[in-house]
Amino acid sequence: MSRLILGFIRHGDYQQLADTPSAHQPFGLSYRGKTDACLEAQKLCRFILHEGWQLLPHIDCSNMLRSWQTAEIFRVILEASLDLSLSTQSYDALAERSVGSVANLTVKEIEDIVNNDPRYPSLKEGWKSDSDFCLPFQGAESLMTAGHRVATHLNTQMADITRKSDTQLKLCVGHGASFRHAAYHFGVIDAEEIAQLSMYHSRPIFLELLEDGSWQHIAGEWKYRSSAAAIPMD
């Protein structure tokens, strides 16, 4: 039976700046992030063998260091365990939402800049997690726009795969918020679910691309938030 499966993998825990909403921080995985990625990669090996899926040779990832490091950990372990030759390919299109020219500033610094600029009204409460809100700075985008960018990249990548008689798995390592919003654009989750869901570090969510072009969630658990009030950028 011909099946195409996409595996969303959120990068591992990383050395994130406190109170800084930019997900374009250039820092690498923490020790915990590396350890979790190793454990989850080993679990994925066992899952692939159990399901009898064929792993495609190119693992996509974002250009953020933490994403590339996670992809490389998966590549090395999957290669050794499944006796395959794999590669990682990095793409700007898989980045998390950009906050533009205020990247890597703290929440207070960003809000102070807006308050001191007569062109803009004060930022509303909860702006960081509002899917449709875009900061008024050059290069900024909304979470929904970032999700559409990621969804477009993945649809293009999956369309280039020739269906065979078996089940083929494409892995993609990126970021939680843009993956959730991409899943919304795929029609896999509803708008109100975006704020309720998160992703476990390094633990895959599996989506199937059906022959009619629609998507469905087939395996892997979303992480449910205890409160939608504190949604991290990544």
Image (spheres, rainbow, N blue to C red):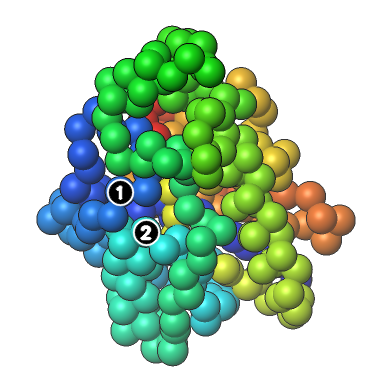
Write the residue at 77% across / 57% down. Answer: 210
Task: Please indicate whether residue 40 sits to the left or right of residue 52 in the image.
Answer: left
In this rendering, position of residue 102 left or right of residue 186: left
Question: In the rendered view of the protein, which quadrant contains the C terminus?
Answer: top left
Question: Which residue is pictured at 35% across the width and 54% down the height?
Answer: 11
As drawn, the residue found furthest toward the left would be 31
| Mark 2 residue element | loop
Please state which of residues 201 and 28 is positioned toward the viewer in this rendering: 28
Secondary structure category for the residue under label 1: loop
Q: Nearer the viewer, residue 207 or 140?
A: 140
Rendered image quadrant of residue 217: top right
Mark 2: amino acid: Met
Q: Which residue is mark 1?
A: 25
Towards the viewer: 145 or 223:
145
**Quarter of the image that includes the N terminus:** bottom right
Position of residue 37 measured from the top left corner of the image (x, y, whole percent): 28, 59
Closer to the chain start, of discs 1 and 2, is 1
- Pointer 2: what residue? 64
Say which residue appears at 56% left-offset and 58% top-offset.
Answer: 93
Q: Quadrant of residue 198?
A: top left
CA neighbours of label 2 inside 10 A, class few (<14), some (14 to 19), many (20+): many
Q: Residue at x 38, y 16 (%)?
A: 116
The image's mark for residue 113 is none
Q: Is residue 189 above or below residue 80?
A: above
Q: Is residue 222 visible?
A: no
- Residue type indicated by callout 1: Gln
Q: Establish if 134 lies above or below 29.
A: above
Q: CA distance from mark 1 to mark 2?
A: 8 Å
Q: Position of residue 177 (x, y in %)?
A: 48, 39
Say whether marks 1 and 2 touch (CB < 8 Å): yes
- Asked if residue 53 shows in the view, the reply is yes
